[in-house]
Image (cartoon, rainbow, N blue to C red):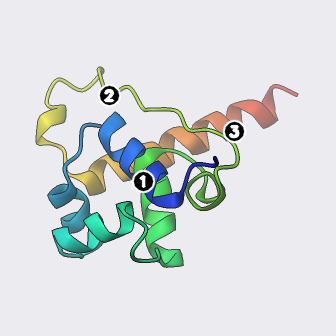
Amino acid sequence: MAETVGERLKKLRNANNFTQNQIAEYLGFKQGQIAKLENNERKLKGSSVIRLSNLYRCSPEYITLGIGEYSKTNLAFRSDKKNLSLEDISDMNRIINNLEFLSRITNK
């Protein structure tokens, strides 16, 4: 049986050691709304998909359709990573993705 959007959201959240409360705050939701998303009782809107794909460093298609994969970002280079907000982590992931893209196109 194919993995649902809610199952992927929960897997991504757990793999990154985030709580439902943290994700709710990041998206401007209530914790109960995150639980409903993870239980497939609520649909995720496009803007939230984009924000989560930046945070989890995966494509929006991975979240919505299960296409492709994701790479957990290793923030070991930051000694104070526990003090980073989810916004900070999302911004860093976007920068990493852009650098990887630039590296791929300049190495051709």
Q: Earlier in the sequence, mark 1 or mark 2?
A: 1
The image shows residue 42 at horizontal and vertical percentages of: 40, 77
Q: Badge 3 local density, few (<14 within 10 Å), some, or many (20+)?
A: few
Residue type pointed to by label 3:
Leu
Describe residue 90's horizontal placement relative to residue 28 as left or right: right
- Point 11% across, 41% down: residue: 83
Residue 96 vs 76, above or below: the answer is: below
Residue type pointed to by label 1:
Leu
- Residue at which label 2 appears: 75
Question: Quick one: SS at disc 2?
Answer: loop
Residue 35 vs 105, above or below: the answer is: below
Per the model, the C-alpha gap separating discs 3 and 2 is 20 Å
- Point 35% across, 35% down: residue: 15
Q: In this rendering, which labeled residue sits more in front, label 1 or label 2?
A: 1
Q: Badge 1 local density, few (<14 within 10 Å), some, or many (20+)?
A: many
Describe residue 17's horizontal placement relative to residue 42 as left or right: left
Cβ atoms at labels 1 and 3 below 8 Å apart: no
Q: Earlier in the sequence, mark 3 or mark 2?
A: 2
